[in-house]
């Protein structure tokens, strides 16, 4: 059975923040999205995973299909703030980098920027590093003060994909934000950056997904991200589960 927005809304509308206006915008985007999904053998409601690459201005949407994630579409980002490197404090006009999680509560149908969802900054890693800031969004329009502005048509599609997944059983979805594609070549290219140590930590999560097309479980411990086997190693050091789940 092909899942449509009408069935998604009837199943779980009461559990998700929404408005008549947001519903109308998603219905408007539905025909575009459903046709594009069908070309990839996908449908609305399948679990989603998103990645952002700041320097190339791309937001990728991946969808779970037959046990792994397939690339659905890469959307061009209209505008984002700042330069390569993480967000450090409120008002620095810098967009974040790291591993974030989006839940139903972070969806914003009342956005002043058409539609939006909060990326989840600051996460446990950011807080451990004393990084501050709030209301970092993926939203419509094309202006940014630390957010990722997608333009209205694209945020309608992204919002619909996320909303459908969250109302069809995905409790949260992961959003990984990178300065660039964390290839070996790019790591050498940017080796002189003061952020290279942080980026090498991010590269571990990037590589884990690239190798398996499974979204890795990533946690924060002592000011670092831990990915997969690193998590197991840390948990055996003293038998105490101190990790904070970021997924």
Image (cartoon, rainbow, N blue to C red):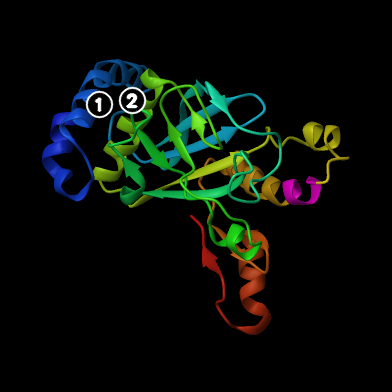
Number of residues whose C-alpha sits closer than 10 Å to that of mark 1, classed few (under 14), some (14–19) or many (20 or more):
many
* Quarter of the figure that contains the N terminus: top left
Image coordinates of residue 147 in percent, x first then y, are 52, 36
Could you say which disc has been placed on residue 75 in the image? none
Query: Which residue is disc 1 drawn over?
Result: 26
Q: Is 106 in front, or is 146?
A: 146
Marks 1,2: beta carbons within 8 A: yes
Q: Is residue 57 above or below residue 227?
A: above
Q: Residue at x 23, y 31 (%)?
A: 22
Q: Residue at x 20, y 28 (%)?
A: 21
Image coordinates of residue 240 in percent, x first then y, are 58, 82
Q: Farthest residue to the left: give it.
A: 10
When asked about the image quadrant of residue 184, the answer is top right
Q: Decide which of tag 1 and tag 2 comes sooner along the chain.
A: 1
Q: Farthest residue to the front: give it.
A: 91
Residue 72 included in the magenta stretch of the image: no
SS of the residue at dot 1? helix
Q: Is residue 217 left or right of residue 12?
A: right
Q: Which residues are magenta?
A: 195-200
Could you say which disc has been placed on residue 156 in the image? 2
Q: Is residue 50 left or right of residue 181?
A: left
């Amino acid at each position: 059975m092909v899942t449509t927005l009408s069935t998604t809304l009837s199943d779980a509308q009461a559990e998700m923040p929404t408005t008549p206006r947001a519903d109308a915008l998603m219905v408007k985007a539905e025909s575009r999205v459903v046709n594009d999904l069908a070309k990839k053998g996908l449908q609305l409601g399948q679990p989603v995973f998103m990645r952002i690459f700041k320097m190339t201005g791309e937001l990728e949407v991946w969808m779970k299909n037959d046990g792994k994630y397939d690339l659905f579409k890469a959307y061009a980002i209209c505008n984002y703030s700042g330069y390569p490197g993480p967000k450090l404090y409120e008002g620095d006009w810098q967009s974040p980098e790291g591993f974030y999680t989006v839940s139903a509560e972070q969806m914003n149908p009342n956005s002043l920027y058409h539609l939006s969802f909060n990326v989840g900054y600051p996460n446990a890693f950011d807080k451990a590093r004393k990084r501050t800031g709030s209301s970092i969004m993926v939203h419509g329009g094309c202006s940014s003060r630390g957010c990722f502005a997608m333009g209205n048509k694209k945020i309608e599609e992204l919002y619909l994909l996320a909303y459908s997944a969250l109302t069809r059983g995905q409790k949260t979805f992961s959003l990984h934000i990178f300065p660039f594609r964390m290839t070996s070549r790019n790591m050498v290219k940017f080796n002189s950056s003061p952020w290279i140590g942080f980026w090498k930590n991010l590269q571990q999560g990037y590589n884990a997904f690239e190798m398996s097309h499974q979204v890795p479980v990533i946690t924060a411990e002592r000011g670092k991200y831990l990915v997969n086997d690193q998590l197991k190693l840390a948990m055996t050091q003293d038998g105490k589960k101190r990790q904070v789940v970021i997924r």
